[in-house]
Amino acid sequence: MMSEGTEERKGEKRRRHRKKYRRQKRTSLNEDHLKLLFTLNTDDKFWNVKKVTEIINRPKGPMLYGEEGSQWLSSRNDTHLLLEELFSPQCIHVLGQVNPRVLDDVRVKLRFLMPKIGRIRFRRVLNDHIPAHKGQKCAYLISNPLERRQLHAFVTKLFVLLFNAELLDHSNVKMFCENIATTFTDLRNRGFLMSRTQILKGIRFDQILWLKGLHFQLKRSIVLNILKSFLNLFTRIFTDVWRRICSQSFDLLRAERKLRFLLATDALPDLDDQIHKLIFLPKKCSVRPIVILRNARLKNKLNIIHAVLRFLIGQCSLLSEWGISNLRLFAFAFRRLSLQYTRGPQKGQRMHFCTADLNNCYTSFEHKVLDEILRKITPTESKFVIVSVQVTSKIYKYRKTKTEAGLSYDDAFSRIICKGSEEFNSPFKSEISSVEFLKMITQFAMRTVIREPFCALTSSAQNRPLRQRLFVSGRGIGQGSSLSVALCNLYLGWVERQISLRSPEIGLTNCAITPFCCRYMDDYLIISDKRERIEKLIDNLMCEMPKFGLYFGKVNISFQLQCQSDRIKPMKSKDKLQWCGLAINRRTLSLTVDYCRYRQRRPSISFPSSALRSSDHFNFICNTIKRALNGRMNLLRNCARVWSAKRRTSLRRDFCRFAHSHYIRQILQRFSLNPKDVFVRDFLSQLSRYIWNGFRKRSLPSQLASSLICNGPVVIFQV
């Protein structure tokens, strides 16, 4: 008994001595060393993680998933080089000043924790999770994006391949890979990396055994530098794929728009203001190149050109009446057709449908034809008066500028239409001649100057600095500006008018008479009670459009053709008619939002750093939901006015379900809010009422519900 008591006392004495020794070891640093530690990696300037945009906009380097990249990685096996890569020079300097043995111990542990990089295994892991080998095309890379679980598995395998899991402990590695997966899943829409606080979320420093005995600030700096080095490597691997996508897309755009090098003989005035930049937006199986002006100060000039172009199109009688500039106009035209079908003489008749779109519409416009159309509709030696008015609303608290054009001041001022709650003041008058108008359209819409992206640069053998070359487009117009829709309606309206003059027996008439013909940009919709009219109309368009350099892509019809064609495909009998984000019921002619189309996409909602604070959750959720769904709600409300109250109620109920499943659920997951909580359910019911009433201000959720969510009862009360 006595021996057992003495052994327990000796054990307690050893534990107290061990704790005292560790405490002395932690506090053995002098004041200079402590100052170095507390100034190490505490500011954002030391967190120099490479951004994705900086790596993409850089000349091509060795592909890390190829043989050269693998050899470059496997050659860095020296411990000193690994220390310099993992730790910053300041961290190594502090380690050497604290205790030289600490630096030697870290080198030994790193030599044990850092295995050699296998080239074959490295390539196999990359090709399993990122489609990087040469056999796969650009369309496959975009149509098969990485999901969150696939990205999590890839990051985990890559970390275990380059480092040992004991470097950070298994639980810390799991949290670190989860943080990376949540950031890079939505990388296409945001394009930036996480901050230091986001990447260290959930990481416990006490579980890293080989860092015991060091100061906590020194532990934090070592772990941050390890994660920083891995993030830089992973970002380069991940952006190699998107660099290939951008280079292939630019080569395709160069062939479609007939880009040629800008010569000194071109002598374009104000060249710096006219240079456009390219943004490649991923589509379902390809990339859509968006051309945007680099100088945002030219927005006033574009507004003036757009106002004059709207005025000329409205006064012109050489265009067909198919084209619409806004989907809201389609709602009113479709309302007239549905009234004829439900209450007019055509009540109960079976309707036939056809949808079609043009291939590469914006890049196929010939500049000679477009210039000829503009000169025909523009009166020679005339001046246009442009009136800009600042419109304010005290009820809804917004301010915007409306610009209209006319032949006189009274004519332009009469075209400015304001709502009942709006007030306008400080009108501004300006004039522009027809010659200046045609010259500005040529500069900003047709002969656009495009700068070569970094991804398309080729490496120089003589080690010369690479320069981005300038190109001038010889065909097509830029997509993405305010002029693109107006010029598209002008070009296609003139082409349709020429076709109708050549074959008047087909019946290319107004949209109020059957066949119902409508076009939004390059998407066609034809509805008629006789299939023969649709067949003649489609055959004539497919035969005449190639004469103007335009070709139809996919054509879908709701009936069987007498003569089969490879381009024309029948629709499935049970499917709704999908057109421009809308879904039309072919039996009842009811119009709803195409929910299937948006459910297949990942919702593109970016979360700014200010919205991650709990005090801003309420405003962020309401503003995001209104910004994403307000336009679709207005379109649905305009189309539902024809139907009964019961039908309108069911349409609103379906819209609220879509908003909750596709948008609100993602926001709740990002903010870690439990939808089963009492207060969250109360807030969601008020948010559903806010959507149901059309985002009216009087239906906003109360501040009480939002304050309860932000202050913390969400975690306490669980259902």
Image: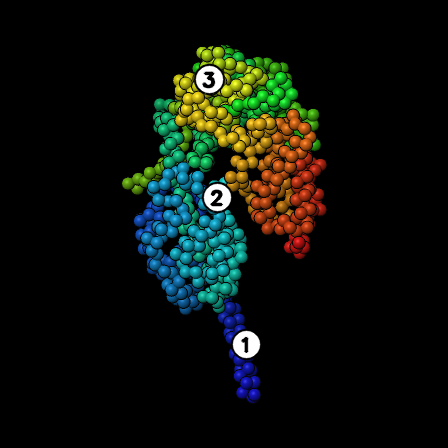
The chosen color scheme is rainbow
Residue identified by numbered label 3: 536
The image quarter in which residue 428 lies: top right
* Image location of residue 388, percent across then percent down: 60, 23
Residue nearer the viewer, 139 or 405: 139
Q: Quadrant of the N terminus?
A: bottom right
Vertical comparison of 401 with 71: above or below:
above
Tag 3 near tag 1, CB within 8 Å: no
Q: Reply above or below: 18 against 140.
A: below
Dot 1: within a 10 Å radius of its alpha carbon, few (fewer than 14), some, or many (20 or more) residues? few
* Secondary structure state at the residue bearing disc 1: helix
Which residue is the site of mark 2?
187
Q: Quadrant location of the C terminus?
A: bottom right
What residue did someone put label 1 on? Answer: 16
Tag of residue 529: none
In the rendered image, the vertical position of residue 680 relative to residue 397, given as above or below: below
- Residue 239 picture location, percent across and down: 41, 44
